[in-house]
Amino acid sequence: MVLSKSIFKCAPKVLFSNHGFFNFQGHYVNRLIGDGCQCHGSEQQQKRTFLSFPKSTRTREYRGRQLVGHTMEQMFEVVSDVDNYCNFLPWCKKSIVLHKTPQNLKADLIIGFPPINESYTSNVTLLKPHLVKAECVDGKLFHHMLTIWRFSPGLKREKQSCVIDFQITFEFRSAFHSHLSNLFFDQVARQMEGAFIKEVGKRYGSASMQPRNLLVNTSADTRNS
């Protein structure tokens, strides 16, 4: 059974609220043109939208920026622990590190949330404690996928804090997968961020503060300038 686009767009909180992750307010960039909620559109229009896969750009980008109550080192250790992704990261069914050095690792991962269940290989660059950058290298599932985590110092008065910049840019090879990502990937990306923060808390103890959204609303800035 395939759920219509309107179900996903109008009830994301119902579909994704049962995981208990932090509700980060990242910014989902480059949505498909005309992807607004069509709850009151005709059934024929909804079927045509879902099955025809509009020929707009399939590239998606999500960005988040948070001030969190954990250190750069703590965040780096969890984000770079690819072997354990399957134990705490939602929809990661398998994660195996094939090769690892202090600056680089290569891993096979399987992601799965209906109807997607696919594997891919990721090449990860490590710059402790500042950067974790992962790139898809096998090209079976994605034309390209780039995930970047940057960690920088937080508040001067709070040593146990840092700023996280999270960015994921990707393009599925499959038009079907691309369409599904347009329906709910912003929710998936937010929960991914929250899962990492939650795991850091489990390993290193309670955060010194609640996460704070630092993402700049560029459209508002433009209007006020």
Image (cartoon, rainbow, N blue to C red):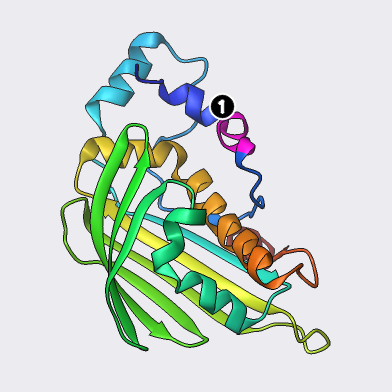
Q: Residue 134 lies in what quarter of the image?
A: bottom left
Q: Is residue 225 visible?
A: no
Tell me the chief SS of the magenta region.
helix
Q: Is residue 201 above or below residue 153?
A: above
Q: Is residue 83 above or below residue 46?
A: below
Near-viewer residue (50 or 193): 193
Q: Residue 139 lies in what quarter of the image?
A: bottom left
SS at mark 1?
helix
Q: Is residue 55 visible?
A: yes
- The answer to whether 4 appears left or right of 124 in the picture is right
Residue 221 at x, y = what percent? 65, 65
Residue at 46 percent of width and 66 percent of height: 167
Question: Where does the magenta region start and end?
Answer: 12-18
Residue 173 at x, y = what percent? 19, 48
Magenta stretch encompasses residue 14: yes
Residue 44 at x, y = what percent? 33, 10
- The answer to whether 136 appears left or right of 21 in the picture is left
Residue occupying the far right of the picture: 157
Residue at 52 percent of width and 15 percent of height: 40
Residue occupying the far top of the picture: 43
Residue at 31 percent of width and 25 percent of height: 50
Residue type at tag 1: Cys
Quarter that holds the C terminus: bottom right
| Residue beneath disc 1 | 10
Q: Is residue 86 above or below residue 47?
A: below
